[in-house]
Each structure stands twice: as C-alpha cells, then as structure tokens.
Amino acid sequence: MLLSMSPTPHLPPPQTMSSSSGGGKMVLVLERQKSFGGTFSAAVTGTEPLTRTAAAATAGATDMFFHATLARTFISALRIRGDDDVVDRLNYYYTPIMLAIACLVVSAKQFGGSPIECWVNPHSRESMEEYIEAFCWIQNTYWVPMYEHIPDSQEAREGQQIGYYQWVPFILIAQALMFSLPCILWRLLNWQNGTDIQHLISAACEARSVIDAEERERVTNSVSKTFIEMLDLREIENRPHPYASLMTRYKPTRLLNGHLVCALYLFIKLFYSINIMLQFALLNAALTSKDHFLFGFQVLSDLFEGKSWTKSGHFPRVTLCDFEVRYLANLNRYTVQCALIINIINEKVFAFFWLWYSVEMTKGPIVIAGGGLVGLSVAYNLAKRGARDVFLFERHCIGAHHSTRVSTGMINNPNFYADRSLQSIVRKSHELYTELDEHGTLGFNRCGRVYLASSDHTAVQARRLFSRLGAEPANSAAELIDCPSEMLSRWPMLATEDVKLALFSPLDATVDVQSLCRLLTDRCRELSVHIHEN
C-alpha cells in the first residue's frame, strides 16, 4: 500500500519511522526536499494489512508532521526573509515588535504598579481602600465632566462607562497576531505549487553578491534552470487532454494552475491593506468611540493642539465608580472618584499606533502591469508628479501588446466630446504630445479629420458637433460641407455617392504610436521608473 500527500521526485534519502503491532507492519516516510523547488511529502508503505494501532500511529505521526510544519511557519514569521519587501516587513515584523513592547509597558503598569487610585473616606481602613480600587478596576468606571451633574439613573451611568482599560494588553497582543497572520499564510502556502520562493530569491541575491565569476555563473544557471523547469511544468499541467470534457478543460483549478503564487501574493497584499482597516475598526470598537474612523485622528489633534481631556473626554484620567456594601442586612450604595493613571499611557500608545497605521497605509511601491501606451502614460504621469518606487512590468517588450501594436494613433478634437471631463483629458493629451514632440521625433501631426454623414441621423449629429466646434476660437477653420462637388474638389479620392454631409475638424491629429512608446519609455527612465521587460 502507498499513500502520498504530494509527488516529490528526486528526493534525498527519506527519514523513516517504523511501528509494528500484531500481524501488521507500518512504515511512515517523512520527506523534505532541500532543492529550490522544495515540497513536503509523507508516505505510508507496508506489505501487510495495517492494524488499528498502526493506523492510529500513522495518523498521529501525520498530525505531528503537520503541527511541526505549522509551528516552524509561525516561528519563521518572526524572522526577516528574502521573499518579501519593505512594506511587508513593516506589517509582519516591525509593527508586531512595537505592539509587543507597548504591551509590556502597559502590562508593567497594570500588573506591577497602581493603574487606578480612588479617593475614599480618610477614616476608612487600608484594606477597604484596596478593596474599592480592586472593585472599580474590575467593574469599570464611568466619566462625567466636572461641570455636569452626575446622572441619577443607573442606566445613564452605565451608558458612560469606560470598559477598555483592563483589556489593553490583550488588544495589543491581538493586533500583533493579526499583523503576523498574512505573513504566516504566505509562508505556509507559497510552496504548495512545488516551488520554494525563498530559496529561489536567496539564490538570486547570492548570485549578485558573489565575486567569483564561475561561482556566480553556477548559481545563476541553477536558478535559471529551476525557472525553466517551473514554466515547462506549468505548460504540461495546463495542457488539457484532447478528449477531456469542456468542464474539465475550463474548471477553475486548471485555470489557476501555474498562477497560484501570483494570485496568493496579490491576495496577501490585499490582506495587509484590509488588516490595517480592520485594526482601525478594532480600536474604535474597543474604545467605545461613536465617531468611527475619525476618533483616532481627533485624539491626535487634541494632543497636537493641547486640548485637555476634561473637554474632549478622550482617555479620561478622573472617573467615577459606584459600588455597594451590604451592612446590617441593608445594601448601601457609594460613589467614589478615581484617578485612572493607566489612561495616560493608553492615550500615548493608541495615538502613536493610529499615526503609524495611517503611515503604513500610504507606504508601498506602485506596480503597473503592462507596458503598452496606457501603462507607460500612467507611469510617466505618476513619476512626473513625484511618485517614488514606480515599477512597470511588461510580459514581452514595450509596445508589443496587441492594442498598442495595432493602434492607428488618431487623436480627436477635444470638442468632439460633449462631456467636459473628456474634453479636459483630450486637451491634456494634446499638451503632452506637443511637449514630447519638441524635437520632431514623435510624428505628432495636426492634420485634421473629415467626418462623413451618410444618413439623416448622422447628419444631425455632425451639425451638433459643428456648433460645439464653433464655440472654440481654435476651431475657426472648421467647415461644414453639404455639396458633393465641393467635397470632390477638396478631397478628390472621396466617394460621395451616399455622403450627405462632410465636417472638417482642424484640431484632430495623429501620432506614431511606436515612437510615442519609445519616448515615454525614455522619459520614464529619466524619472527613475523601474521598467522590466520580458
């Protein structure tokens, strides 16, 4: 019998654990490939029927293998590796460390110091004071401004309760775990298609740092060979059987095969962004704010402007606490005033992390997929506006995409569009092409265009367009011609049999698309845009 979790050819000698019970014999094989395309596999082999004890041992060993893998992945999330970028490290490494430090600071004050001090009757015993402070810490306190009357009803007091200060260390730990979760998922799943991304990137980085030419060539060839094998394997796995059904050919698992790492990487990036938004939601829910996501920014604004907590009520230092004491079969209710010292630390901690999360959401490179005319234009305009770390990736070579390669390069008159936003976009296009064509290498030519109307409906549209063109002084040369003989005198090659109206627009232009792609590529590189082809 042979049970395999994943096929792993060409592995080193496996580690074996054997067990026998009664008439059955079981051998568990745990294998770990150490090459670039490393995967895990587990196999159970045997020549005799497995007994219940042997089967239990098999299941236990498999569980042990899975838990060991999960534990190694969790621990590895605490280390920086080569299969991530700066933004990833800010999320899964530096932020959890800062959260852990903040948790230690708050816990030291909360469990080792005096997080709350309550004013009690001077004639009360010390034990009674300790009891009141412990009770108020556990039971929650509530805040009422000094200049306002304390509500008489219990419901009104409970509506102003502050119930988060006991949970701050646990909130910080939960946040640290949430920031580590995307990294754990990435490292747990990115090798599922048989490729060890971390080893590949480490080898590529090693090739860059090796001085010896022969050693560098050896490492480079090894990485290249692995990539070629990956591409060949993806092509084989994506090739459907000629007699396969339509559902088999286009089932989602087949369509995603070979693109799992890319899809997972994009999902993890999205997960990081969603996680930060969830952190804002968690903080606001935990701190019982009614201002949603603006609460943290209001706290920061109060700190910068020096606004006192006595007016805003954010992280109040002086609160009230109600407790009851049973005395001689009577239930006596008391209200004491307490100094919530821990809130001084809580305010600074949460204000810092609100600011830090806001900075994290704005960090990160800009990645543009596709080196066609649209991708190059986006990269050029972003870099021109001061954006840094702009990356453009093209699967083939720049300008080789289908839509760019077959483009005619015709640019409409801005007034061709009734929508003012579209008019503005076309005007900016004309300005951009005029700027790029300063040396005459772009082939930007305002040759004008003739619009032909062959029906009454299109003739009405042409007359409306002519009225819009006439509103611009630059279109003073626009003409509306309804005489076939005049059309032939202007454009001798024109067939006028079914033409009812001709409109000449002087500002329409053409551009050489391939020259435009080359110019945009040069300008992007001058502005430090990282362009990667093939």
Image (spheres, rainbow, N blue to C red):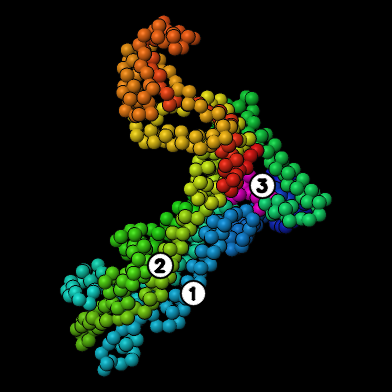
Query: What label sits on residue 351 in the rendered view?
Result: 2
Amino acid, disc 2: Ala
**Left or right of residue 496, residue 192 in this image:** right
Q: Give the range drawn in magenta.
A: 189-200
Q: Quarter of the image containing the C terminus?
A: top right
Question: Are the two marked residues, 3 and 2, in contact with CB atoms closer than 8 angstroms?
Answer: no
Q: Which residue is drawn at 68% across and 41% down?
A: 230
Q: Where is residue 84 in the image (x, y as percent from the top left)?
A: 60, 54
Viewer-nearest residue: 248 or 440:
440
Query: What label sits on residue 382 in the rendered view?
Result: none
Amino acid, disc 3: Thr
Q: Which residue is denoted by mark 1 in the rendering?
A: 104
Amino acid, disc 1: Leu
**Left or right of residue 486, residue 396 in this image:** right
Q: Nearer the viewer, mark 2 or mark 1?
A: 2
Q: Residue at x 21, y 68 (%)?
A: 155
On screen, residue 365 above or below 129: above
Question: Are the two marked residues, 2 and 1, in contact with CB atoms closer than 8 angstroms?
Answer: no
